[in-house]
Image (cartoon, rainbow, N blue to C red):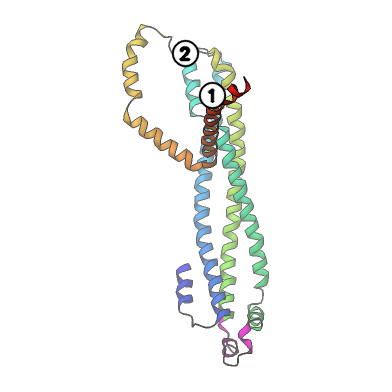
Amino acid sequence: LAGQVETRAAALPAGDAVLAKAAADNLALARELLDANEALAAQRGKLAAEEQALARDRAALRDSRTRLELGGRSEQVGTWLWAVLRRLESEAALSERLADTHQSLAGVRLRLIALDETQRELVDPAALARQLRANDPARQDEDGPAARAAGNDPVRAWLEARVDLAARLEPLLWRQVAALEQAERTLQARLQSTTELRQLLDRNLLWIPSHPPVDAAWFGRWPDGARDLAKPSRFATSARLLKESVAQRPLRYAGAVALVLALLWLRRRAPARLEGLA
């Protein structure tokens, strides 16, 4: 659809500013329609992933409570609980995604308000076309675009096409609102269940053995463990994860680096200040 609008806009005659503006607005709306469709697909994919994660969180919370209520204090239970804790997503990451979802939802709702205003303006495309021509500075020119379009004004056709584009965009935006609202509820539920599960694990893991005691066999496994820890693939994975984390939170890392540099600078100045005070 956007390609069709772009092709029509490219074929317009030059010199008609009102017609060019109408075509540009239609093209922007057509591209927004395409972006909204892609955004809706992405939001639904994220929602499905969050709902699956919520189901796993609730299952882990339920199973952990059951094992502890049945008096499971064995090493096997401790190992299982420790694995649950390691898989648990941080509350900070969930809160950040919840804030992003809330912001996206507010943006879509504001866009719906603006689209409603546009649709009200387009109730009578013919009257709006006449108004645009009346406000055109070229209307005084007898040979200008306004005079030539006095009969069958092509601006009206572009405005009527905009009515259709707006009518197609509105339900997509409402579907985005529904998906984002569901995602917001899902993230809130995940945050609650994750907090409950982490508190439950923190209360009990200290008193439950989660690995065999250190003995002679453990020292025998140490060389293999050290070689596994020093594998190049682990460093490559750590570097990739660090790069992704810096890209997601650049201000946090920049602040940490600035703080370290400030502490080093103060440390270099401290001896001289102490000598001056002595």
Picture residue at 48% right of the left edge, 38% below the top:
245
Q: Give x and y (percent) for residue 91.
A: 58, 33
**Label 1 is placed on what type of residue?**
Asp
Write down the region rendered in magenta. Answer: 136-154
Of 156 and 100, the residue lying toward us: 100
Is residue 164 in view?
yes
Q: Tag 1: Cα neighbours inside 10 Å, few (<14), some, or many (≥20)?
A: few
Q: Give x and y (percent) for residue 122.
A: 64, 73
Give the structural element (helix, strand or loop) at label 2. Answer: helix
Of 216 and 182, the residue lying toward us: 216
Q: CA distance from mark 2 to mark 1?
A: 16 Å
Q: Which residue is mark 1?
A: 63
Image vertical order of residue 244 relative to residue 178, above or below: above
On whether residue 51 falls in the magenta region, the answer is no
| Mark seen at residue 75 | 2
Q: Give x and y (percent) for residue 148.
A: 57, 90
Picture residue at 32% right of the left edge, 30% below the top:
232
